[in-house]
Amino acid sequence: MNALAEAPRWYNALTHNCTTTIWHHVKAVGSDFPLDWRLLANGYLVDLSYELGTVNTSIGLDELKRRSDITARAREAGAGEGFSLSIRDGLPSRPSTVARRP
C-alpha cells in the first residue's frame, strides 16, 4: 500500500475491474474461462455464465435472475450472525448439482 501511495498507478475500470481481475487470476491457475466482452461490461456476466453453464441452467435466465434476487431477504435479515446463510436459503441450486450444458 505504501508503494501505491508513493507512486499511484492508474486504474483502468474497463480492463482491470473486479471481474477481469478474477479472470486473470483463474487463467493463471489453468482455467479455460474465455475472454468475452461481457467480462468488460460486467453487468452482463450472468448472461455469459448462463451460456457457459457455470450457473443453474435448468430454468430460464430471466427466472434464474428473479429467483436469485436477494435484496428483500438481505433487508429482512439485517446485519449479524447467520446473514450469509439466511440470504442464500431457497436460492436455485448451484452448478455442481445441476447438469451443465455441453
Image (cartoon, rainbow, N blue to C red):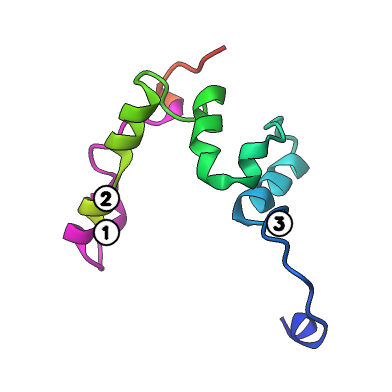
Q: Amino acid at mark 1?
A: Phe
Q: Amino acid at mark 2?
A: Ile
Q: Residue at x 76, y 80 (%)?
A: 4
Q: Residue at x 57, y 11 (%)?
A: 102
Position of residue 36 in the picture relative to residue 66 (left or right): right
Q: Do the CB atoms of the residues marked 1 and 2 lie less than 8 Å apart?
A: yes
- For residue 41: magenta? no
- For residue 93: magenta? yes
Q: Position of residue 13 (x, y in %)?
A: 67, 60
Furthest residue in direction right, as rendered: 7
Q: Do the CB atoms of the residues marked 3 and 1 lie less than 8 Å apart?
A: no
* Marks 3, 1: nearer the viewer: 3
Residue pointed to by mark 3: 16
Instruction: Say what secondary structure mark 1 lies in.
Output: helix
Residue pointed to by mark 1: 83
Quadrant in the picture for the N terminus: bottom right
Labelled disc at residue 87: 2
Q: Position of residue 90 (x, y in %)?
A: 23, 37
Precedes in sequence: disc 3 or disc 2: 3
Above or below, 67 relative to 76: above
Q: Nearer the viewer, residue 61 or 56?
A: 61
Q: For the image shown, how many numbered marks are present on the structure?
A: 3
Q: Which residues are the magenta region?
A: 75-95
> Alpha carbon of mark 3 to alpha carbon of mark 2: how far?
29 Å
Instruction: Say what secondary structure mark 3 lies in.
Output: loop
Q: Position of residue 47 (x, y in %)?
A: 50, 31
Q: Residue at x 53, y 39 (%)?
A: 44
Position of residue 12 in the picture relative to residue 90 (left or right): right
Instruction: Say what secondary structure mark 2 lies in.
Output: helix
Precedes in sequence: disc 3 or disc 1: 3
Disc 2 crowd, CA 10 A, few/some/many (<14, 14-19, 20+) = many
